[in-house]
Amino acid sequence: MPHGPLSLPARLCLLAWDAARPTATARLSDLVRAGALTELAQRGLLTDEDGIATPVDLDAAAGDAVLDGLLELVRESCPHSWRTWVTLRARVTLDAVREQLVAEGWLRAEKKRVLGVFPSVEYALERVAVVDALREETRQVLLGPSPVPGVSERDAAVAALAAAADLLGQDLAAREQRVEELTERAGAASPGLARIVREVRAAVSAALAASASP
């Protein structure tokens, strides 16, 4: 995919931008946070210690404002599991990603007032054609026919998390094996990384199921 400069949380945020199927803020927050956790783990900045998301180095940085913001939050907080971090204060990461995408020209921020009194910000997608292409490329990764070993670890992570959030509107029951293979591919860089990706993916799926419950 020719979208390397975009971080995983930014790519997932854009993938979720579908006017025909609006994504609730809470669900989007969880997905974006899952992407940020996954990228920090893939970069070796977060590791797993007995199921706890743990910073590897107290001074290391990702060089990305969104990722570094989350890394600092993890450092300053009590220890939590990966699943907990997917939802805990996830709106902070979503807000940071939106600000980043506005600054880079992917989104447009429109200030409004709710009931004519309360200030609010709505976001509109600017590069619609590019995001449509990103969505189609992710769908191809998810559905095949390219062999999973030929998929990059970043693209595999995006597809696996997008599937967990049901972003692409596909019947994935028959693709469960493919999603699992993509999860393994996303964590191929180091031992235990696939388990981390699996944990955050499960948390996204659980949050989606909870939001759909009456």
Image: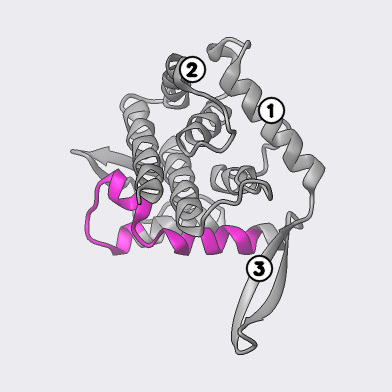
User: In the image, what residue type sits under mark 3?
Assistant: Glu
Mark 1: which secondary structure? helix
Q: Nearer the viewer, residue 92 or 115?
A: 115
Query: Over which residues does the magenta segment extend?
Result: 74-100
> Which badge, 1 or 3, is on the more N-terminal residue?
3
Residue at 61% in and 83% down: 119
User: In the image, what residue type sits under mark 1?
Assistant: Glu
Query: Mark 1 = which residue?
Result: 137
Q: Is residue 159 visible?
A: yes
Q: Nearer the viewer, residue 120 or 10?
A: 120
User: Residue 118's image quarter?
Assistant: bottom right
**Percent of width and height locating residue 112:** 68, 78
Q: Residues within 10 Å of mark 3 (few under 14, many from 20)?
A: few
**Percent of width and height locating residue 61:** 47, 53
Mark 2: which secondary structure? helix
Residue at 70% in and 29% down: 136
Q: Nearer the viewer, residue 212 or 128?
A: 212
Point out which mark residue 122 bears: 3
Residue at 78% in and 41% down: 130
Count of numbered circles in the view: 3
**Percent of width and height locating residue 111:** 69, 77
Query: Mark 2 = which residue?
Result: 175
84 in magenta: yes
Mark 3: which secondary structure? strand
